[in-house]
Amino acid sequence: MPTVAKGEVRYSGGVWRTRVTLKGKNRLDLPFVHLTDPEQRPEAELRSGFVSVQVGKLRRAGKIETLAARELLLALGAEEAELGPEAEAVVDRLCGTKGDPLAARGGGVTFKQVADRWTNNELADEHPDHVKEKKTSELDASRLKFLCGLDVGGVKLGDVGLQRFTIDHAEAAMRQLPERAKRAATRRHYAQLISRVLALAVYPLRILKVSPLPRGFLPKVGKPPKHPYLYPAEDRALLAHTPTPIGWRMLWGFLAREGCRTSEACALRFGDGVDLKNGTISLDENKTDDPRTWAMNAHVKAALAAWFKVRKAKAGDLVFPEGAATPPYKLADLLRAHLRAAKVDRTALFEAGTNTGALRAHDLRGTFVTLNLADGKSESWIADRTGHQSSVMINRYRKAARTAAELNLGALDALDRAIPDILRGPSPTGSPTERRPTSRKK
C-alpha cells in the first residue's frame, strides 16, 4: 500500500473515519467501520491515504460526483481486508484507465483541464498548502479561455495534452495575443498564466516532471503607464446623470470616496462588510490577505442607508449587484461610456498615449488617493482604507496630488447629495449638506 498523505483522520462515534474532498466544497465523511479500536490510528491513516489517491483518480477522470463513485468509496470504507491492487483496479476500471498508471496520473490531462480546475478553485480545495485560493479569478479565467481557444499548429492550446506541451505551443499562443495586449505588463500576465498552469502540472499535480518553459520566457515588465483621475466636477456630472442606472452611479461614487479595490467593493454585502449601524466597512478576504476595518465617510454611510431602502435590500444582499455580475475587464468601458453620456469630454480620460492609459474603474481608487493627499490626509489614513502595503505605492500619486492642490480642485461632493435620485434624508450633521470645502495644510 502506498504511503501517501494521511488525510483528515479522526476517531468519532466509536470508529475511525476520514473526510475527503469530492469537488469544491463537497466533502464525504467516510467511516472505516471495522477500525473501532482507538489504538488503530496507523491503520486508519494508511487506509485514508489510499482512499485519497483513489479520490484523486476519480476526480481527474470526471467520475467523482457519480453514484457509482460514491458507492465505491463507501465500499472501500467498509472493506475489512487490506486495500491493495485489487481495490485499485476497481477504481481504475470506473475511471476508464484500466490500471494504466500514466493515464491515472494525468497522461491524458489537457492544458484546459488544469486551467479550469485552477480558476474555479478546485486545486485550492484539494491542495490548500500549495495552491492559494483565487479570490479575483474572473480576469484570469477570461484570459485563459482566450488562450485555450487559440490555434497552435492545428490544435487548440486548451486541447494540448500536458505530456505533449512544448515551448512552441506557448510561443504560438503569445504571437496571437489580442490587440489590446500591447504593453509588456499585459503580455507578461498572459505568459504568467501559461507558466502557472504548467507549474501546477509539475506540483502538486505531478503530471509533469519539469515545465517545458525555459527561464526567460516571461516578457520583462516595462515602466507602467500613468492613468488619470477624475476631477470633482467630472465626478459631479457623472453621479448627477440620472439616465445612467443608479446602481452604477452608487458604485462609481463609492469607489472614489472610500478607496477600496473594485473587486472588494463588488463583493461587499450589507451586514457582512458594510455595517450601517456602526458606520464601518470591513474586508476579511482581499488581495493581500490583510483584513482591515475603517470608519466610512458619514455621507457615504447616509447614501448607503438610503440605497438599502431604495432597493428594499436585506442583510446579506450584495451592495453593488450590477458590479458583481459584470466581468472586471468590462468595467473600464462601462465607466467611460457613463462619463461620455454625462457630457464629460476630457481627452485624457478616454484616449491612451505613449506613456499614458485611459481611465479605468481601478483609477477611481487613484482618485481617492490623489484628492485625499491633496487635502492633507496622512499616508496611514489612506492606507487604512486602500490596503496599500507600503509608502511606495502611495507615493506614486504625490505628483498628481500636488497638481490637484495647485489647481484648487477641491474635494468630491457628499455622496448622499451628489446622486439626486437617491432617497433624501437629513444630513448626518443635521444641516443641509453642501460640497465640503477643501482644507489643506499650508
Image (cartoon, rainbow, N blue to C red):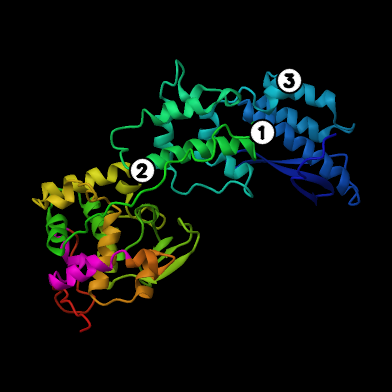
Near-viewer residue (104 or 203): 203
315 vs 398: above or below: above
Figure check: 230 above or below 407: above
Q: Which residue is mark 3?
A: 100
Quarter residue 302 falls in: bottom left
Residues packed near mark 1 inside 10 Å, few (<14), some (14 to 19) or many (20 plus): few
Separation (CA) of disc 2 from disc 3: 43 Å
Decide if residue 349 is on the left or right side of residue 82. Answer: left
Q: Position of residue 335 (x, y in %)?
A: 22, 48
Q: Amino acid at mark 1?
A: Lys
Q: Which residue is mark 1?
A: 209
Q: For residue 108, what is the image quadrant? A: top right
- Marks 1 and 3, how far apart in space? 18 Å
420 part of magenta stretch: yes
Which label lies toward us, 2 or 1? 2
Q: In this picture, which residue range is highlighted in magenta?
A: 396-421
Dot 2 falls on a residue whose secondary structure is helix
Task: Please provide percent x and percent y for residue 432.
Answer: 14, 75
* Residue identified by numbered label 2: 184
